């Protein structure tokens, strides 16, 4: 485990889980991941967790009467496991105050565009359709608005003339996997400093 790391991590994921895999494979972050939570019973992300020997929890949104109740169900899972940091990795639900407030400043999300451009669930398609020449990846802290919280890291990804959704998404994913592990490392090592919307990452020891 990384010398300065000190936070049990939960990853929330709805789908494929390639970002989860990048985090599981990271030598600093991986050992701190205690639980993976999904709103889809068949999410590949849950399989990836089990393969890595990490607890996989399916929480059925259908049994919660509303969003707040579902958020409380997630919060209970996190609190029972003394989770200190949360990484959303393709979790396709907007979190509300029941979850965001107790974990303020400790929930990260990764988004496949340079926010505030192209928020929402179709960022890659929307960047292509707009004719953007550059898009990218944003890691941000989560607040109660979708794709809105303070930006932690961003990196540009060029859009090529012959790109389609698949080719652009593949390039974006490569950038995501590299960026997300750095951001989650910084969070678990307590190196993320927030002042209003401005976020600074302190250098790691030995950088
Ligand atoms: C990623 O593109 C991420 O930016 C977005 O959802 C996608 C999840 O991909 N929030 P994966 O499940 O990690 O492969």
Image (tube, rainbow, N blue to C red):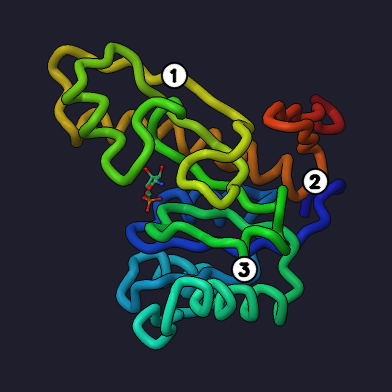
Q: Could you tell whether 196 is left or right of 57 in the image?
A: right
Q: Position of residue 1 (x, y in %)?
A: 77, 54
Do labels 1 and 2 touch, CB within 8 Å?
no
Label 3 near ligand 1 (CB < 8 Å)? no
Q: Position of residue 111 (x, y in %)?
A: 44, 39
Mark sitting earlier along the chain (1/3): 3
Residue at image x 46%, y 71%? 67
State the residue in front, 59 or 68. 68
Label 1 near ligand 1 (CB < 8 Å)? no
Mark sitting earlier along the chain (3/2): 3
Quadrant into which the C terminus falls: top right
Spatial CA distance of label 1 from label 3 is 33 Å
Residue at image x 48%, y 55%? 20
Residue at image x 40%, y 72%? 39
Estimate how packed mark 3 is, as few (under 14), some (14 to 19) or many (20 or more) residues with alpha carbons within 10 Å. some
Q: Position of residue 73 (x, y in %)?
A: 56, 80
For residue 189, the mark is 2
Q: Position of residue 185 (x, y in %)?
A: 70, 44
Which element carries disc 1, helix, strand or loop?
A: strand
Q: Which residue is disc 1 drawn over? A: 156
Which element carries disc 3, helix, strand or loop?
A: helix
Spatial CA distance of label 3 from label 2 is 25 Å
Estimate how packed mark 2 is, as few (under 14), some (14 to 19) or many (20 or more) residues with alpha carbons within 10 Å. some
Mark sitting earlier along the chain (1/2): 1
Do labels 1 and 3 touch, CB within 8 Å?
no
Q: Nearer the viewer, mark 3 or mark 2?
A: 3
Up the image or down, 181 lies above or below 51; here it is above
Q: Which residue is disc 3 drawn over? A: 98
Q: Could you tell whether 133 is left or right of 100 in the image?
A: left
Up the image or down, 197 lies above or below 103; here it is above
């Amino acid at each position: 485990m990384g010398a300065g790391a000190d936070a049990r991590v939960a990853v929330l994921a709805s789908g494929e889980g390639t970002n989860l895999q990048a985090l599981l494979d990271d030598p600093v972050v991986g050992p701190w991941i205690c639980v993976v939570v999904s709103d889809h019973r068949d999410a590949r992300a849950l399989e990836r967790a089990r393969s890595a020997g990490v607890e996989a929890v399916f929480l059925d949104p259908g049994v919660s009467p509303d969003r707040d109740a579902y958020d409380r169900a997630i919060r209970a899972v996190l609190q029972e496991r003394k989770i200190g940091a949360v990484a959303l990795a393709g979790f396709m639900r907007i979190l509300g105050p029941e979850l965001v407030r107790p974990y303020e400043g400790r929930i990260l999300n990764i988004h496949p565009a340079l926010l505030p451009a192209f928020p929402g669930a179709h960022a890659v398609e929307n960047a292509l359709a707009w004719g953007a020449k550059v898009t990218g990846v944003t890691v941000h802290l989560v607040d109660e608005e979708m794709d809105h919280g303070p930006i932690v890291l961003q990196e540009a990804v060029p859009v090529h003339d012959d790109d389609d959704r698949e080719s652009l998404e593949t390039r974006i994913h490569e950038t995501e996997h590299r960026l997300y592990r750095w951001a989650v490392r910084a969070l678990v090592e307590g190196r993320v400093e927030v002042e209003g919307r401005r976020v600074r990452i302190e250098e790691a020891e030995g950088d």
